[in-house]
Image: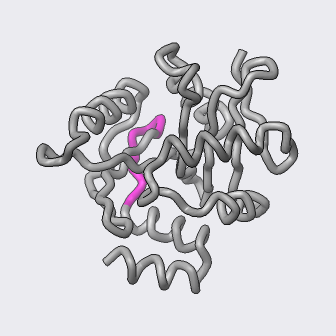
């Protein structure tokens, strides 16, 4: 059975999570791991190792604000892929935050992108798991993302709500620089 184990209280999987994070996400999409880990010690962030027994299977990094949970990062270990683990992780997150709307970013579809087939598959995966397009994209540095949401009542997370969440997570000073770099 899969479990979510909070990394701030369980350093057993720290190195596994760090290695997976650094290999699963391209540099343009990564915040330095030390900053992520430090931010996870805050009250509105959880950094989960996904385990099955004692085996590390993946990671999930979430930030919440009001009734919104942002799935900032989700990755499955290469040896666990293709076994429905990603869908099971999403179910665990939905169960962990049952009264919240979930939001996440995926690279926006772009027929000119080298990895557009991968982007299509990723979007189909999230749609299969109950997510829907929020109706807007966001730009973070040089990457354009589509925001996708999950909510039992199909109410999307608005762009203003998403911005407020990011601002609360980063703090005023970091948000100022983030917003300038993302214009």
Camera-side residue: 168 or 141?
Answer: 141
Residue found at the very far left of the displayed protein? 112
Residue 124 is situated, as x and y percent measured from the top left of the image, at: 30, 29
Q: Where is residue 183? Give x, y as percent.
A: 31, 78
Image quarter hosting the N terminus: top right
Q: Is residue 35 left or right of residue 14?
A: left
Q: Is residue 171 above or below residue 57?
A: below
Q: Is residue 21 magenta?
A: no
Above or below 133: residue 124: above
Q: Which residue does the image show at 40% across and 68% down from the upper left?
A: 160
Q: Is residue 183 above or below residue 117?
A: below
Q: Residue at x 47, y 16 (%)?
A: 82
Residue 152 in magenta stretch: yes
Q: Residue at x 78, y 45 (%)?
A: 7
Image x and y of residue 119, in percent? 28, 38
Instruction: Give me the residue at 72% from left, 58% from top.
Output: 37
Please tell me in which quadrant of the rendered image residue 148 appears.
Answer: top left
| Res 91 quadrant in image | top right
Residue range (magenta)? 151-158
Q: Is residue 99 visible?
A: no
Q: Please, is residue 154 above or below residue 157 in the view?
A: above
The image quadrant of residue 169 is: bottom right
Give the colouring mode of the picture: one colour
Location of residue 182 in the rendering, given as x and y in whole percent from the top left corner: 36, 74
Whether residue 62 is visible: yes
Viewer-nearest residue: 173 or 152? 173
Secondary structure mostly seen in magenta is loop
């Amino acid at each position: 059975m899969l479990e979510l184990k909070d990394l701030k209280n369980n350093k057993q999987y720290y190195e596994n999570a760090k290695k997976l994070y650094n290999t699963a996400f391209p540099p343009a999409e990564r915040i330095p791991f030390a900053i992520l880990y430090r931010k996870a010690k805050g009250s509105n962030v959880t950094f989960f190792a996904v385990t099955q027994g004692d085996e590390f299977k993946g990671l999930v990094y979430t930030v919440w604000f009001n009734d919104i949970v942002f799935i900032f990062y989700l990755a499955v270990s290469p040896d666990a892929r293709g076994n429905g683990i990603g869908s099971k992780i999403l179910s665990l997150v939905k169960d962990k935050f049952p009264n919240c709307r979930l939001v996440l970013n995926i690279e926006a579809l772009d027929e000119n992108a080298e990895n557009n087939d991968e982007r299509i598959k990723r979007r189909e995966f999230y749609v299969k798991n109950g997510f829907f397009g929020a109706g807007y994209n966001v730009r973070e540095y040089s990457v354009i993302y589509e925001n996708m949401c999950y909510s039992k009542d199909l109410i999307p997370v608005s762009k203003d709500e998403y911005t407020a969440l990011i601002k609360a997570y980063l703090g005023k000073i970091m948000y100022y620089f983030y917003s300038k770099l993302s214009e």
